[in-house]
Image: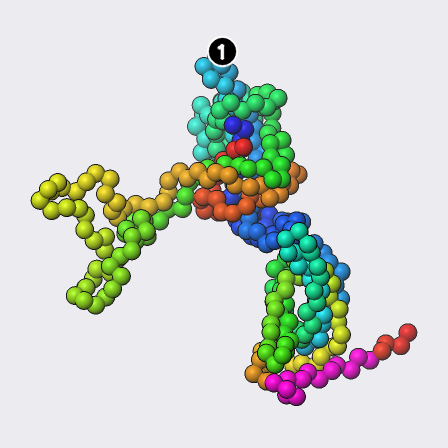
Amino acid sequence: MNGLIGKKIGMTSVYDNLGKNVAVTIVEAGPCVITQVRTEEHDGYSALQLAFGDRKVKNTPKALMGHFKKAGLEEPMHRVQEFRDMNLDKNLGDEVTVGDLFAEGDKVVVTGTSKGKGFQGVVKRHGFGGVMQQTHGQHNRLRAPGSLGNSSFAAKVMKGMRMAGHMGNAQVRVRRLQVVKVFPEQNIILIKGAIPGHKGAYVTIEK
Amino acid sequence: MKELEAIQFVHDQMLVKPEFPAFNTGDTIVVTYRITEGDKSREQAFRGDVIQIKGHGMTKTFTVRKMSHGVGVERIFSVSNPNVVAIQVLKRGRVRRSRIYYLRGLVGKKARIKEKKVVAVAK
């Protein structure tokens, strides 16, 4: 899939051609630099490795720095990622911009890391109803999970029982999002709806 | 590009700058807007007093209030909405506050707005 690495900037709403107000996410997508070309003969699969984002030299391992130098980069980049079966007529060290890949109306897949929510109970994490009442003998149980299973038969809690725990901060993939607008010169793309992650988070956009 | 700059840039690019006459709170205006029903579209006018103007740039909206068969009707329009075709100012009203919500509690002769005397500038 052809794709790019981008940075989530924030959300706003714009009017589309029909005069409808649509919520959009602004993403700064690229320009990414091709840092490695994987080929069928050499690596067993074909892919392009792209790099994006700012990074300080002092925070970059020397090995990675050498890897960037091979692609002709002076400054190190923050995010390095491979995109499988990316067919573009570009070579090592070339820039890939948002205008090369995406156009208005395209359906894209966005992958990112969702916002971390910490340790959450079952009501927020799994959408349980809770006890729903405060009277009839209920005390301190308003958001409790209820029963975990059967009694003497089974006599254990089944594997996969949904319980409280850590929520968010996991990779999330959202499919079939529509591209509302592309500004190739500013490297900005408007995607309809919400995408995972906080502002400033790295996401990948694939077509 | 910084975050806020980028959002501002998108707003600037997406804002259709319509050439509407300037109006203020208290003015009586006619808003002509397009309604699309199925594949047909027609234009409809909404005439009333501007009771508030809110936001700026792309998010600027204004509320128009009118009395329809003895019932107060308010409609909020967005300046950047492409379906708002035209705005015509009929009367300039003299009001002392920017949001004249007190009009909602008044009916009949009390709900009138004094007209602003516009002095013609001699050339």
Q: Secondary structure at mark 1?
A: helix
* Residue A38 rendering spot, x and y as whole percentages: 50, 18
Q: Nearer the viewer, residue A160 or A182?
A: A160
| Residue reaching furthest to the left | A152
Q: Nearer the viewer, residue A38 or A107?
A: A107
| Residue reaching furthest to the bottom | B109
- Magenta run includes residue B109: yes
Residue drawn at 61 percent across, 85 percent down:
B107
Residue drawn at 29 percent across, 56 percent down:
A129
Q: Quadrant of residue B41?
A: bottom right
Query: Which residue is identified by label 1?
Result: A41
* Residue A112 rendering spot, x and y as whole percentages: 45, 39
Mark yes or no: residue A176 visible: yes
User: In the displayed structure, would residue A94 be above or below residue B89?
Assistant: above
Q: Quadrant of residue B108?
A: bottom right
* Residue B54 rendering spot, x and y as whole percentages: 61, 67
Residue drawn at 40 percent across, 46 percent down:
A115
Dominant secondary structure, magenta = loop
* Residue A116 rendering spot, x and y as whole percentages: 37, 46
Type of amino acid under label 1: Glu
Residue drawn at 59 percent across, 50 percent down:
B7
User: In the displayed structure, would residue B5 be above or below residue B28?
Assistant: above
Quarter of the picture containing the C terminus of chain A is top right
Q: Residues within 10 Å of mark 1 (few under 14, many from 20)?
A: few
| Residue reaching furthest to the right | B123
Q: Chain of mark 1?
A: A
Mark yes or no: residue A188 visible: no
User: In the displayed structure, would residue A146 be above or below residue A73?
Assistant: below
Quick check: A140 left or right of B122?
Answer: left
Instruction: Give the residues in magenta.
Output: B107-119
